[in-house]
Amino acid sequence: MRARWMMVLAMLLWTTGAWAKDFQVGFVYVSPVGDAGYSYAHDQGRKAVEAMEGVTTSFVESVPEGQDAERVITTMARKGYDMIFSTSFGYMDPTLKVAKQFPDVKFLHCSGYKTAPNMANYFGRMYQARYLTGMVAGAMTKSNLLGYVAAFPIPEVIRGINAFALGAQAMNPKAEVRVVWTKTWYDPAREKEAAKSLLDAGCDVIAQHQDSPAPQEAAQERGVYSVGYNSDMAKFAPKAHLTAAVWNWAPFYTEMVRQAQAGTWKADSYWWGMDKGVVDIAPFGPMVPEEVRAKVQAAKEAIGKGENPVFVGPIADQKGVERVPAGKALSDAELLSMNWFVRGVVGTLE
């Protein structure tokens, strides 16, 4: 009799929602959450989701792109996760493959371009923040040589380098951006060596599209400036750190979960920008003059209002060929497929 009443009670709790299952959200990271960089920024967004009522989250860090990613994503889907965020470019095809096997699970892939009925892609308009940090770097360089430690030659990274260069040139037409590829997202030793090679070439500001603060540490050791990425890394190189292009994933992640809970979520392509608070710049270092701060702040306000699309012509490429006519702005499709460097960038796309 007792067992029967327990079953009746369980049924009652379930049907009334008093014993409803939490909405389960999983996150997959390519590097450690303690890297103070890319995965750290995503995990700050996860924590905002974790704080939502009726939601539980989990994550797996340092997952290599490829088969390992597919295995981790599949495991989450089999465990009954309702929504899964895979946060690295190389997770795109593994996510798509798993999404086809689990049509009732909602998948979101960061920085890619493929979708499915239950899989969205998303990213932020980081090029907006890159442009602003480029303005600071262009104003602060004395050698007119800016170094950029970059991960992989894909549109996401190329677009950021170009925006940084355009921002630098807006403040200093003589500024030149030299690029070194590391072919890794997270390898502090390799990142630091790449920064040193740029410093040896005369660069006196080091920027990066990498997950660790190693390039900035290299800059501080040489007594020059740095521009960070992903989060405010000032504490790692306080004497060098000018500012950083930073992520704030909380607004996006919480909104996607809210929509999923409400039954309104769609497998779309999401590209939020500074107007929605997903991208920003870190506080200026004390060495940045007030005049520079004011100009950057004015540009930031214009971008937030949609008055500065960043990639507006005339813009020429490395060979001097006009890519964007005067007065014309690149479309999102053109930005998402960018595979050329603007004039003033020194480096190859290999």
Image (tube, helix red, strand yellow):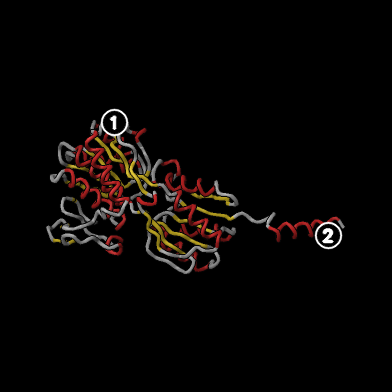
Viewed as shown, does residue 135 lie left or right of 16? left
Q: Nearer the viewer, residue 155 or 72?
A: 155
Q: Helix, strand or loop at disc 2? A: helix
Amino acid type assigned to the residue bearing label 2 in the image: Arg
Q: Residue 166, percent across and down?
A: 21, 50
Residue toward you, 253 or 299: 299
Q: Is residue 158 visible?
A: no
| 154 lies above or below 218 | below
Amino acid type at image mark 1: Pro
Q: Nearer the viewer, residue 90 or 228?
A: 228
Q: Tell me the quarter of the image containing the N terminus.
A: bottom right
Residue drawn at 51 percent across, 63 percent down: 264
* Relative image position of residue 154 (x, y in whole percent): 30, 57
- Horizontal and vertical percent position of residue 181: 27, 50
Task: Choose top left, top right, bottom left or bottom right for residue 231.
Answer: top left
Q: Give SS at disc 1.
A: loop
Q: Earlier in the sequence, mark 2 or mark 1?
A: 2
Counting other residues with Cα less than 10 Å from the Cα at mark 2, is it few (<14), some (14-19), or many (20 or more)?
A: few
Q: CA distance from mark 2 to mark 1?
A: 70 Å
Quadrant occupied by the C terminus: bottom left
Q: Is residue 62 left or right of residue 198?
A: right
- Which picture quadrant has residue 287? top left
Identify the residue under disc 2.
Answer: 4
Given residues 11 and 301, the one toward you in this image is 301
Q: Is residue 186 above or below residue 332?
A: above
Query: Which residue matches tag 1?
Result: 286
Q: Is residue 143 left or right of residue 134?
A: left
